[in-house]
Amino acid sequence: MTSAHSAEGLGDALRGLGLREGDVVLVHASLRNVGRTEQGAATVVDALRRAVGPTGTIVVPAFTEANSLTSRAHREQIRGMTDEQVVAFRAAMPAFDPATTPSTGMGAVAERLRTTPGARRSDHPQTSMAATGPLAHAITAHHPLDCHLGEASPLGHLYCLRAQVLLLGVGFERCTALHLAEYRLPNPPRRTYSCVLTTGDGLERGRSWTDFEDVALDDGDFAELGSWLEGQALGSGQPLVRHGRIGSASARLLPLSPAVDFAVPWLQDHRSTQPQGWPFTQRSVTASTPKTVAAAMSPWVRIPHPPQMNGP
């Protein structure tokens, strides 16, 4: 059996890949692909800290995709339910709380960093970001509800900070940074999102469903876009994407801002334009539908169409 990867060894490999003291880095990681480590996800987080040092900042997505009425995760949860069962399920869905709600589908490394003492998290109920380091508060303090991953979100702040993106054992289909390019397309398609929020404090604490409109996020072509980005070069002539191995995982490191800048014209050339407010399929309410169910259906029957739209 091979020995477990150490934080020191992984940190050295991250430095070899190109991370430097003081860097701001957005991390997407698969602990399984990194391989056996001395202390699981904690070893990878420790390695990242070693690579960027005390003046560096580490950021991870802390998304909660299931807190939605139109996401893939939520549609899978309610698959096969009757209307009455769906109403009951949604009535019991916990409201998002940035302090306690775990991320879903982001991996053990992201969740470990989110729960690290002193880590900060933005308060978006679907696409929050968590960070640790001297710039963590500045990056996560402002995250408007109607800006999942646009200019006013932590991702927009990372663009201005000229952050790095680390894809550790994952592909470009997981590269959140590319969503910022969607916001920069002329007249990007938009749609309505729904989520359940925590309201009030103390004895007045409660929950409520909220609808908002934002860009229709779609990561369906990010793998193809990433393959194209692999062949691009910076103005200095250096490749946009650096490759290496971290533990047992293949890794890519790339500068966030140029990657987004490259992505915008590619998306313009490769995506057909959807009209703003692209259609929703409405589940019908018939005479046989119980009145209590029909009344409850209106906030959640919107199912996005076309189905390849892969946002929250």
Image: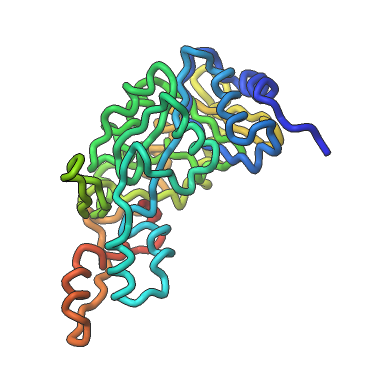
Q: Residue at x 44, y 26 (%)?
A: 117
Q: Outermost residue, right direction?
A: 1
Q: Quadrant of residue 36?
A: top right
Q: Quadrant of residue 32?
A: top right
Residue 136 locus on image (x, y percent)? 38, 23
> In this picture, is 121 found above or below 11?
below
Viewer-proximal residue among 270 and 98: 98
Residue 9 locus on image (x, y percent)? 70, 22
Q: Is residue 11 left or right of residue 108?
A: right
Q: Residue at x 32, y 53 (%)?
A: 94
Viewer-proximal residue among 312 and 134: 134
Residue 253 locus on image (x, y percent)? 56, 28
> In this picture, is 16 found above or below 230?
above
Viewer-proximal residue among 143 and 81: 81
Q: Residue at x 31, y 42 (%)?
A: 97
Residue 161 locus on image (x, y percent)? 38, 20
> In this picture, is 104 found above or below 159?
below
Q: Residue at x 24, y 46 (%)?
A: 198
Q: Is residue 36 left or right of residue 232?
A: right
Q: Is residue 112 left or right of residue 292?
A: right
Quadrant containing the N terminus in the rendered view:
top right
Q: Quadrant of residue 13?
A: top right
